[in-house]
Image (cartoon, grey):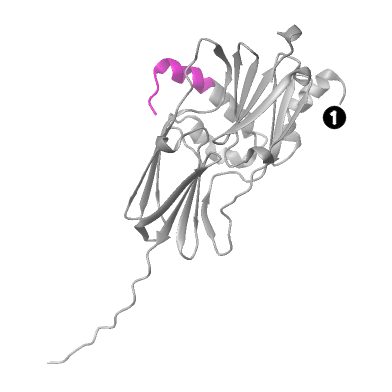
């Protein structure tokens, strides 16, 4: 990953272009009293199959969504759901790397709670 | 989907911008362009058929089992639901909203005759999977012709 901060930022914001056939999960970002909540739309992906990385101000989720309904002899008629690699980076206005991070999966939503250390709030 | 105009206006520019951000890196999404301008929530669906059943998979994270309403009439399957938006609370403010919320309704014609008394619906990790048993093919009955 490029080390220059501006180039790093451009790289993380455009990872989906650089990684080829990735799809980008939608994301909601909330701010509350204790920090930030980032909610990723990751239906069909178990929380333990999601790779979460933090770098500077960036939170990145990545992984592969697999079709668990595939079986021998089953013929597909319509396929709107993407089953492939996904990747998405979100920039927050805090130093994520030195913050407390908590993750939780709720009905296909992957929640990342970022709690900055007191001096950053 | 009918949301209050204020909330609908809040969502649409962000949803559209996100759609256009996705458009260019993946040309396969170009066929979904008309949905960008639709007011209806359109959760994606997969439809597959095996020897004994039809399987419908709907991507709809962040919902509860009680938020879905499923009907099968003949070989038409209808899935209604509502993806509820979390109302702003005093200790929380929204900085970015890309995820789409609201009511949806999707109807599809199933590729085979099905048994409405043998349907299994499971909601797991944000995916609704409906498995419907196919009707057994009616055995062919040979008609004997009599002469008068």
Point 56% across, 13% down: residue: B93
Within 10 Å of disc 1 (Cα), the crowding (few <14, some 14-19, many 20+) is: few
Residue B70 found in image quarter: top left
x, y percentage for residue A39? 60, 26
Chain ID of residue with mark 1: A
Looking at this view, is A12 or A97 the one in front? A97
In the displayed structure image, the side of residue B78 where residue B95 appears, left or right: right
Q: Does residue B136 lie above or below A90 as drawn? A: below
Q: Determine the main secondary structure of the stretch shown in magenta.
A: helix
Looking at this view, is A69 or B146 the one in front? A69
Q: Which residue lies furthest to the left in this view?
A: B148
Residue A91 found in image quarter: top right
Q: In which quarter of the image is the N terminus of chain A?
A: top right
In the displayed structure image, the side of residue A26 where residue A100 appears, left or right: right
Point 29% across, 83% down: residue: B142
Residue B25 found in image quarter: top right
What are the residue bounds of the magenta stretch?
Answer: B1-13
Magenta-span inclusion, residue B6: yes
In the displayed structure image, the side of residue B106 where residue A9 appears, left or right: right
Magenta-span inclusion, residue B124: no
Looking at this view, is B9 or A114 the one in front? A114
Residue matched to label 1: A1
Q: Is residue A38 visible?
A: yes
Q: Does residue B42 lie above or below A117 as drawn? A: below
Q: Can residue A22 be seen in this view?
A: no
Q: Does residue B91 lie above or below B33 as drawn? A: above
Point 49% across, 15% down: residue: B88
Q: Residue furthest bottom?
A: B148
x, y percentage for residue A9? 78, 22
Point 58% across, 63% down: residue: A72
């Amino acid at each position: 990953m490029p080390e220059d901060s501006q180039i790093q930022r451009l790289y993380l914001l455009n990872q989906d272009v650089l990684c080829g056939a990735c799809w980008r999960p939608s994301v909601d970002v909330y701010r509350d009293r204790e920090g930030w909540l980032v909610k990723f739309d990751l239906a069909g992906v178990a929380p333990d199959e999601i790779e979460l990385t933090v770098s500077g101000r960036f939170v990145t989720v990545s992984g592969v969504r697999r079709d668990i309904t595939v079986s021998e002899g089953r013929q597909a008629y319509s396929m709107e759901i993407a089953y492939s690699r996904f990747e998405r980076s979100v920039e927050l206005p805090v130093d994520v790397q030195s913050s407390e991070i908590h993750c939780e999966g709720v009905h296909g939503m992957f929640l990342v709670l970022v709690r900055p250390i007191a001096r950053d709030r | 989907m009918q949301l209050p105009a204020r909330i609908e206006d809040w969502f649409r520019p962000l949803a559209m911008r996100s759609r256009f951000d996705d458009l260019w890196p993946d040309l396969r999404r170009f066929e979904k362009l008309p949905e960008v301008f639709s007011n209806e929530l359109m959760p994606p669906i997969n439809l597959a058929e095996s020897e004994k059943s039809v399987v419908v998979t709907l991507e709809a994270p962040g919902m509860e089992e009680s938020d879905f309403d499923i009907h099968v009439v003949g070989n038409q399957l209808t899935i209604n639901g509502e993806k509820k938006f979390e109302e702003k609370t005093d200790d929380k403010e929204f900085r970015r909203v890309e995820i789409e919320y609201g009511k949806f309704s999707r109807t599809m014609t199933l590729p085979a005759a099905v048994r409405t008394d043998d349907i299994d619906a499971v909601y797991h990790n944000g995916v609704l999977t409906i498995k419907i048993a196919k009707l057994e093919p009616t055995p062919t009955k040979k008609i004997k012709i009599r002469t008068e």
